[in-house]
Image (cartoon, grey):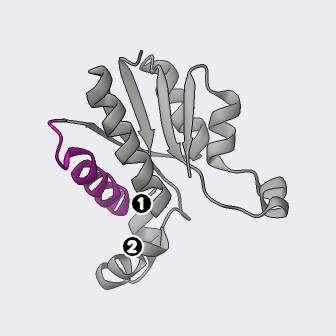
Amino acid sequence: MFKNLLCAIDGSAQSNKAVELAADLAVRYGAALTLIHVVTATSIPAELASFVEAEYRNPADAAAFGILGQRIVEDAVAIARKGRSLKPVQVVDRGEPAERILDFAAREQVDGIVVGRRGHGRLAGLLLGSISSKIAQLAACTVILVR
């Protein structure tokens, strides 16, 4: 069913669950797996804030230069490989996350995207939208949202 899977990651607990599912699907279907993180000035998950503060005075600088993005991808690779013989492709990009993820998926002819779904309240979700919602609405391929 899947030949080319893409897993969008941000370093959050939901993202890590998405990596586990994407890795399981890649093994099951013999699919290629790409892990992508899109760096924005506000893409620093709480779980990694202490790392950024220890290494850099300004967390936004770390995100802007992709250093944190690379760390997020490396951590996701470790999750994907745990107990599996996978060699995921690693991608760190910059820009608006949903747009860059969808562009990558179209360019690379991805047939499935796995992404964690953050738990916004109803009002926040209506006002802000979410990256996962945008991907689910606009992707030309199958999208799996992981809670």
Q: Residue at x 42, y 39 (%)?
A: 7
Query: Is residue 47 positioned above or below 23 on the image?
Result: below
Circle 1: residue type: Gly
Element carrying mark 2: helix
Give the magenta-colored segment's residue range: 66-85
100, 129: nearer the viewer: 129
Circle 2: residue type: Leu
Q: CA distance from mark 1 to mark 2?
A: 8 Å
Residue linked to disc 1: 11
Q: Within 10 Å of the Cα at label 1, are there few (<14), some (14-19), or many (20+) other Cα atoms?
A: many
Q: Position of residue 46 (x, y in %)?
A: 48, 74
146, 62: nearer the viewer: 146
Residue linked to disc 2: 48
Q: Within 10 Å of the Cα at label 2, are there few (<14), some (14-19), or many (20+) other Cα atoms?
A: some
Q: Is residue 67 magenta?
A: yes
CB-based contact (under 8 Å), mark 1 and mark 2: yes
Q: Position of residue 68 (x, y in %)?
A: 35, 63
Element carrying mark 1: loop
